[in-house]
Amino acid sequence: MPRETKTMAILFADLVKSTQLYEVLGNRKAQLVVNRCLDLLARISIHYRGMVVKTIGDEIMCAFEDAEDAVKAATEMNKSLEIYSFPEMPGFQAPNLHIGIQYGPVICHSGDIFGDTVNMASGMTALAKPRQIFAGQQVIDALSPRTRQSARLVDRTVLKGKAGEFDIYEVIWEQKDVTVILDEGLPPQGPRCDIELRFRDQVLSMDSHYPSASLGRQPHNDIVVPNDRVSRSHARIEYRRGKFVLIDQSTNGTFITITGKPTAVIRREEFVLDESGTIGLGREVKPDSPEAIVYLVTRS
């Protein structure tokens, strides 16, 4: 069969921590979860005019002629797994995904696809955190203006096996879930600002070099609050030019108390953290509550 060169968007979607499923659920149930999740991802790919190239263990590789379709499929994959249920395992939540997409020339041969574009999509998948969609510059350039607005430049880095550095974009699919954009050309704004977050025995420090942290119920978060009123990805804290902004993404809201001031409740909104205080995910908390995230902002 002759080799054919095409321009395509390659998408890899990898189930997060699937090996742990076998330890927790046992072989039979874990395999059922992996198979059903991959089947769902395959159906979504086909719905968005893509083709399933192959599955590799807990990962699926798909190809699309249109980069826009690839991004829409990736978004739908995340959303669908978030609400997917397993009747045999009440309360069990489907695993999250790492997704990487690249657009460019590929070689098609004997039902498989090869080339630099494939390698770059795979490399970005390895860099993505759970629930993130990473894409290369070529993908962003091929998107419609409206879809391109949901993309944020998050890093310029090297990829395994590739010479030079590459821009990595995150496609934002969760409301208010915005990663800090690289802001190298802007002048410094005021004094240095740091924040320290304490939850039980955990301490997390943030500054301009560690500019983003996630809070929520699932293990992929930087601070995990195991409570049924806490959403999977409940909120984020981001550093923005000298300030730390809390962004609520939840159902039950976030309760923020700056020391000496009334408690503020935000739902799908943003709030600038200042001085010191407490953060309650899904409910109001006191500073000594085991559910309280205590924070301290310092400037120097």
Image (cartoon, rainbow, N blue to C red):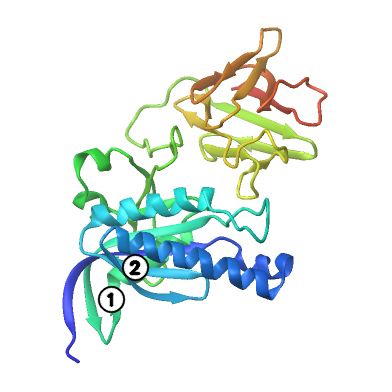
Q: Position of residue 269 (x, y in %)?
A: 49, 23
Q: Viewed as shown, does residue 229 lie left or right of 177? A: right
On the rendered image, what quadrant is the C terminus found in?
Answer: top right
Residue 180 in view in this figure: yes
Residue at 68 percent of width and 58 percent of height: 89
Name the amino acid, label 1: Gly
Residue 156 in view in this figure: no
Q: Nearer the viewer, residue 297 or 189?
A: 297
Q: Position of residue 111 (x, y in %)?
A: 29, 83
The image quarter containing residue 154 is top left
Q: Nearer the viewer, residue 109 or 164?
A: 109
Q: Which residue is mark 2?
A: 62
Q: Nearer the viewer, residue 253 or 148?
A: 253
Q: Nearer the viewer, residue 99 or 250?
A: 250
In the orientation shown, which residue stands out farthest toward the top?
261
Q: Which dot, 1 or 2, sits closer to the camera? A: 2
Q: Position of residue 261 (x, y in %)?
A: 67, 7
SS assignment at label 2: strand
In the orientation shown, which residue stands out farthest toward the bottom?
1
CA gap between label 1 and label 2 equals: 14 Å
Q: Which residue is mark 1?
A: 115
Name the amino acid, label 2: Cys
Number of other residues with Cα within 10 Å of mark 1, as a class: few under 14, some 14 to 19, many 20 or more: few
Residue at 37 percent of width and 59 percent of height: 44
In the figure, 152 relative to 261: above or below?
A: below
